[in-house]
């Protein structure tokens, strides 16, 4: 199997697996217990917290661990709107955001909030003038993803955060696809990140919160996580996340250079007739979303079972609906259904990528009755 689905999840780094092992086996104590073993488990969580905070690289805040980025985003949106001053009940977001943002906004809209969904251009990027035009004293929160999970484009989050702050709004940045891949700009008040997108374990994520911008709790109970999030913490998962985050920070430049080479090699292997979806300049190079007119992308995936790639977001797979992101950049349903997403990164070799892309290209041409 050649794995080209890094946006869905990444292979667990050996260092992260090793960091988890003691807390799965011998050191299994509840970190909220006052026993010596419990205190040791709690200390391991604090070490991991610091590692993730340093990888995020922002000053003036701290993070709380969550079970998923979806939970972190729900918490950020619902908790911020719950605490918002009277008269501030609007959310500004983007039509190409992850479902965790869009579906939560739909839920809040059904409970009286106003939601503005900004359009993006053919390149997948928002226009800052559009952001500025909709910001007023009724806006409680602005939610913009840094690196899009389906097409990899990089939004101008730093500039958006500045505009949000000037309007007195809280800025939420979904940095799930960005952590370890591109620098997270200053300015956001809340930042959601996830372990399994940076070679850590599934089931652990975090919400970074600028001091004073902490949302109201989403989960109630013992308040184990900084008094803001209830539930027994998993030292093993936290340790794995911390180790993956430390490694991502150490390898940041090396990983970026490797991905740049892979991007160039993949594009060079494609025959004429493919189009890249979204901007190629403002983009994480580990996300290659491409389309070919008339291609049956679902059939292509079925015909290449030993190559793992996707049509778009793993969260929306199987829905039968064309990608909302691809529709947002102006593609027709037919064009969206002729698109595939190749995701690669640290553990992808150039040899296997070139081999897989060559096979994808050949199969696509054969499907359309073209000579190899």
Image (cartoon, rainbow, N blue to C red):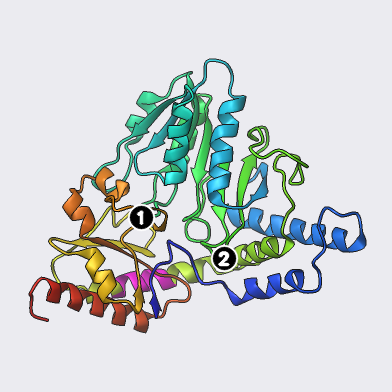
Q: Is residue 43 above or below residue 63?
A: below
Residue at position x 57%, y 65% in the image: 248
Residue 118, given in percent of the width and then of the height, sits at 34, 34
Q: For the residue labelled by badge 2, is the local secondary structure a helix, a strand or a loop? A: helix
Relative side of 275 to 98, left or right: left
Residue at position x 61%, y 62% in the image: 245
Q: CA distance from mark 1 to mark 2?
A: 21 Å
Label 1–label 2 contact, CB within 8 A: no
Label 1: which residue? Answer: 150
Residue 276, given in percent of the width and then of the height, sits at 24, 60
Q: Quadrant of residue 160?
A: top left
Along the line of sight, the residue nearer the viewer: 68 or 150: 68
Looking at the image, how many numbered discs can be counted on the residues?
2
* Marking on residue 188: none
Residue 58, given in percent of the width and then of the height, sits at 61, 47
Residue at position x 62%, y 45% in the image: 208
- Viewer can see residue 191: no
Residue at position x 48%, y 70% in the image: 255
- Viewer can see residue 287: yes
Looking at the rendering, the stretch of residues picked out in magenta corresponds to 258-265
Prevalent SS, magenta region: helix
Relative side of 258 to 50, left or right: left
* Mark 1 or mark 2: whose residue is earlier in sequence: 1
Q: For the residue labelled by badge 1, is the local secondary structure a helix, a strand or a loop? A: loop
Along the line of sight, the residue nearer the viewer: 1 or 175: 1
Residue positioned most to the top: 87
Label 2: which residue? Answer: 248
């Amino acid at each position: 199997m050649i794995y080209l689905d890094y946006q869905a999840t990444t292979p667990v780094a050996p260092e992260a697996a090793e960091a988890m092992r003691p807390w799965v086996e011998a050191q299994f104590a509840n970190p909220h217990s006052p026993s010596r073993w419990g205190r040791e488990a709690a200390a391991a969580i604090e070490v991991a917290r610091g590692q993730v905070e340093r990888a995020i690289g922002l000053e003036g805040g701290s993070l709380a661990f969550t079970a998923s980025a979806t939970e972190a985003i729900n918490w950020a949106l619902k908790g911020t709107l719950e605490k918002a001053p009277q008269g501030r009940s609007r959310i500004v977001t983007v039509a190409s955001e992850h479902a965790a943002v869009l579906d939560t906004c739909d839920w809040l809209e059904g409970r009286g909030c106003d939601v503005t969904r900004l359009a993006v251009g053919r390149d997948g990027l928002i226009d800052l003038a559009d952001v500025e035009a909709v910001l007023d004293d009724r806006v409680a929160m602005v939610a913009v993803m840094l690196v899009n999970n389906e097409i990899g484009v990089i939004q101008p989050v730093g500039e958006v955060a500045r505009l949000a702050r000037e309007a007195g709004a809280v800025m939420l940045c979904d940095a799930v696809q960005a952590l370890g891949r591109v620098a997270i700009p200053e300015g956001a008040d809340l930042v959601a990140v996830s372990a399994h997108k940076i070679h850590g374990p599934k089931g652990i994520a975090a919400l970074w919160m600028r001091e004073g911008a902490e949302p109201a709790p989403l989960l109630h109970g013992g308040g184990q996580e900084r008094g803001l999030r209830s539930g027994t913490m998993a030292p093993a998962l936290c340790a794995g996340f911390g180790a993956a985050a430390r490694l991502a920070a150490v390898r940041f430049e090396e990983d970026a250079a490797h991905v740049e080479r892979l991007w160039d090699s993949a594009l060079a292997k494609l025959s004429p007739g493919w189009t890249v979806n979204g901007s190629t300049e403002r983009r994480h190079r580990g996300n290659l979303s491409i389309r070919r007119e008339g291609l049956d992308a679902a059939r292509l995936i079925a015909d290449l079972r030993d190559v793992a790639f996707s049509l778009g977001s793993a969260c929306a797979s199987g829905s039968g609906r064309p990608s909302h992101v691809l529709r947002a950049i102006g593609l027709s349903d037919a064009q969206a259904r002729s698109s595939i997403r190749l995701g690669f990164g640290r553990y992808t070799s150039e040899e296997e990528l070139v081999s897989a892309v060559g096979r994808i290209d050949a199969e696509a041409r054969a499907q359309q009755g073209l000579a190899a």
